[in-house]
């Protein structure tokens, strides 16, 4: 599916967490009493996976995402209309826009991908999450992480990967390595 595919909100099908509708809905599932707490929990997880306590929110990107997020607002209201989210749409979107604005570099992406390649364990062998979660995430990335180009990417490259609008790609070579790259021109 394309990153802004909207039919999932209408069908009630399993939501793909690798595209906008799924990522928006996923924000409602993060533990926390407020959406600020939910975002902080996500930020802490990102820092832990990357082994980098200095990862932070890029305020400029966040403000831009929030100011120009009309399509994401439409998707979120569709999700709400069809009962896929129950909370206040703007609160959910604020968490989503913040999540989309977490600043990472290539090393951070590679370290996160390494944890997924190493069945949930970091470089020191500490288990950050159960191996089955890495298996699930890698499977979804393989089939959906590169949006509507996922099939072609799977055939040409053959590893689970996730691209982002900022130009980053995180790839997982299971049991071998994590890869983080950046190119502002991912495709046309």
Image: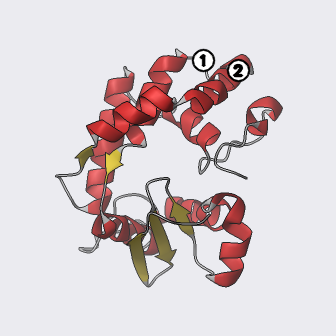
35 horizontally vs 171: left or right: left
Query: Within 10 Å of the Cα at label 2, are there few (<14), some (14-19), or many (20+) other Cα atoms?
Result: few
Q: Nearer the viewer, residue 57 or 44?
A: 57
Residue where numbered disc 2 is placed: 83
Q: Which of 155 and 31 is in front in this view?
A: 155
How many numbered discs sit on the rendered protein? 2
Residue where numbered disc 1 is placed: 86
Secondary structure, mark 2, is loop
> Farthest residue toward the right?
11
Determine if residue 34 is in view.
yes
133 horizontally vs 71: left or right: left
Image position, residue 22 (x, y; %): 62, 41
Q: Is residue 184 above or below residue 88?
A: below
Corner quadrant of residue 119: bottom left
Q: Mark 1 touching mark 2, by CB under 8 A?
A: yes
Q: In this view, does 126 lie above or below 78?
A: below
Query: Within 10 Å of the Cα at label 1, are there few (<14), some (14-19), or many (20+) other Cα atoms?
Result: few
Secondary structure, mark 1, is loop
Q: Which residue is drawn at 39% across and 24% down?
A: 35
Corner quadrant of residue 9: top right
164 horizontally vs 155: left or right: left
Image position, residue 71 (x, y; %): 62, 32
Determine if residue 84 is in view.
no
Q: Residue at x 72, y 17 (%)?
A: 81
> Farthest residue toward the top?
88
Corner quadrant of residue 57: top left
């Amino acid at each position: 599916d394309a990153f802004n595919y909207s039919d999932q909100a209408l069908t009630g099908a399993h939501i793909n967490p690798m595209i906008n509708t799924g990522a928006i809905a996923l924000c409602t599932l993060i533990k926390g009493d407020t959406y600020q707490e939910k975002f902080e929990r996500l930020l802490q997880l990102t820092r832990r996976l990357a082994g980098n306590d200095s990862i932070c929110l890029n305020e400029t990107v966040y403000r831009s995402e929030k100011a120009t997020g009309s399509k994401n607002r439409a998707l979120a209201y569709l999700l709400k209309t069809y009962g896929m989210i129950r909370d206040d749409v703007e609160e959910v979107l604020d968490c989503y826009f913040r999540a989309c604005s977490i600043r990472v570099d290539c090393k951070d992406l590679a370290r996160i991908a390494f944890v997924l390649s190493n069945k949930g364990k970091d470089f020191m062998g500490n288990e950050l999450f159960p191996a089955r979660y890495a298996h699930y995430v890698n499977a979804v990335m393989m089939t959906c992480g590169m949006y509507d180009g996922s099939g072609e990417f799977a055939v040409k490259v053959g590893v689970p990967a996730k691209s982002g609008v900022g130009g980053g790609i995180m790839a997982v070579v299971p049991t071998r390595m994590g890869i983080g790259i950046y190119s502002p021109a991912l495709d046309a």
